[in-house]
Image: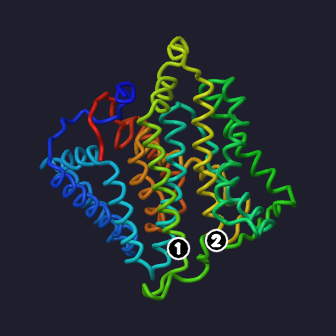
Amino acid sequence: MAANRLVGRPVSGESLIPMSQLKTQLVILIGISLSVIVLYGFLYLEHEWEIGLLLVALPVAILLLKRANMLIYFQTAARMMPRFTLVSFVLGVLALILLLRHEHFALLMLTTVLLYVTVSLGLTIQFGFAGLVNFAAIAFFGIGAYSMAVLNHNFHAVPDLVIILFSGLISALLGALLILPILRTRGHYAALITIAFGILLRTFLEVNDVFGGPQGLKVDGLEILGWDFANSFPSVLGGGSFYMAYAIAALLLAAAAYLLTRLIEASWFGLNMDSVRLDEVASASFGINAPRWKITAFMVGNFFAGLAGAVYAAMSGFIAPASFNFADSLLLVSIVLLGGIGNAVAVIPAALLIVVLPEKFQVIQEYRLLLFGIVVILILRFRPNGLIPRGLRQYFTGSSA
């Protein structure tokens, strides 16, 4: 019992403010409500000047909240009751999905953001916890998508939920093979291996007729527990967009991935991964098997990517090798760097900014990769730990609700 309490969670250096349970829940609900309102603004507003005003008002509001110590209150409350915070956020986004149920493009963007959050959480485990650089995240995303397409087409009797899980497992197993040469390299050489793997996978898919070649494959829609996602949302709720069901599925997937990521972080799994990342030699001297934890982190992260890829394939209805290029891998790495390396919460606003802003500002669409590169350079130069840095791991005996 005492050993389990020593693992702890990374928290920021801010002093924590004692609060009653009722006050804690109230602070959490206010914070989640404000976050959902901001999310609604990014998704619903269409004119560039409206998005521009929101981008100007947001940092000003954050600064005012910080000066009023409201951010510390919310941080303290979320840390005291992490499960209540997660459930409140999920319910808040569900309410937002219902509110946007007739907005096709907004729901498509929201679903894409949530799927990218899931993949970025996998990168957080790999990069932020175990110190593994992976520039092939979109390749494993594509493996999950192609696994979904092939299995869904050839095994109609198998439930789609099982196929999604199996698609994630295929991505994880292929990741276990790729990690073997990575373990024999260090630094940028390991990164080059992941880049090469992504290029090889795309080339393999383009020349292999079994997977549709450059023309790609058609993918059937999901049907889970008798609910056909191709049909609109139940009319009792006023109907809804085709993307509504996929938005809900992506939300539940992202919530499950986030919960698992935080459980790993707060357990001996996360502690051992942190130890390996910080000093592999010192870890080995204490009996920690570094290759084992690197393999575990790589497989779990790629499992997340495979699951997200399977849902993406079913939602898109069609996949091709061109859908999974190296630029998308850079985008996913940018999300992790922008938010904060190792911070599971930070990937949510980072994914929102990187996915939604280019769609809202069409004028920068052609220069998206250039802007992402500039953003990454500026972040690495002036704020290498990201916009929301991961807190230091502290060991405490408090309980969470």
Q: Name the residue beneath numbered marker 2.
A: 222
Looking at numbered disc 1 in the image, what kind of residue is underneath it? Ala
Looking at numbered disc 2 in the image, what kind of residue is underneath it? Leu
CB under 8 Å between discs 1 and 2: yes
* Number of numbered discs on residues: 2
In the figure, residue 388 lies in which quadrant? top left
Mark 2: few, some, or many residues within 10 Å (few <14, many ≥20)? many
| 181 or 229, nearer to the observer | 229
- The N terminus lies in which quarter of the figure? top left
Report x, y in % for residue 246: 54, 70
Task: Write the residue at 82% across / 61% down.
Answer: 213
Mark 1 or mark 2: name the one nearer the start of the chain: 2
Q: Residue 245 got which mark?
A: 1
Which residue, as the protein is rendered here, is positioned at the far left?
Answer: 68
Report x, y in % for residue 387: 35, 44
- Distance Cα–Cα, label 1 vs label 2: 9 Å
Task: Write the residue at 20% across / 55% down.
Answer: 27
| 219 or 352, nearer to the observer | 219
Task: Write the residue at 47% across / 38% down.
Answer: 264
Q: Is residue 319 left or right of residue 285?
A: right
Q: Is residue 218 left or right of residue 97?
A: right
Which residue, as the protein is rendered here, is positioned at the far front?
Answer: 1
Q: Is residue 255 left or right of residue 1?
A: right
Report x, y in % for residue 263: 44, 41
In the figure, residue 164 lies in which quadrant? bottom right
Q: Is mark 1 on a helix, strand or loop?
A: helix
Compared to residue 340, the image places residue 257 above or below, namely below
Q: What element carries label 2?
A: loop
| 357 or 367, nearer to the observer | 357
Mark 1: few, some, or many residues within 10 Å (few <14, many ≥20)? many
Report x, y in % for residue 209: 87, 61
Compared to residue 68, the image places residue 102 above or below, namely below
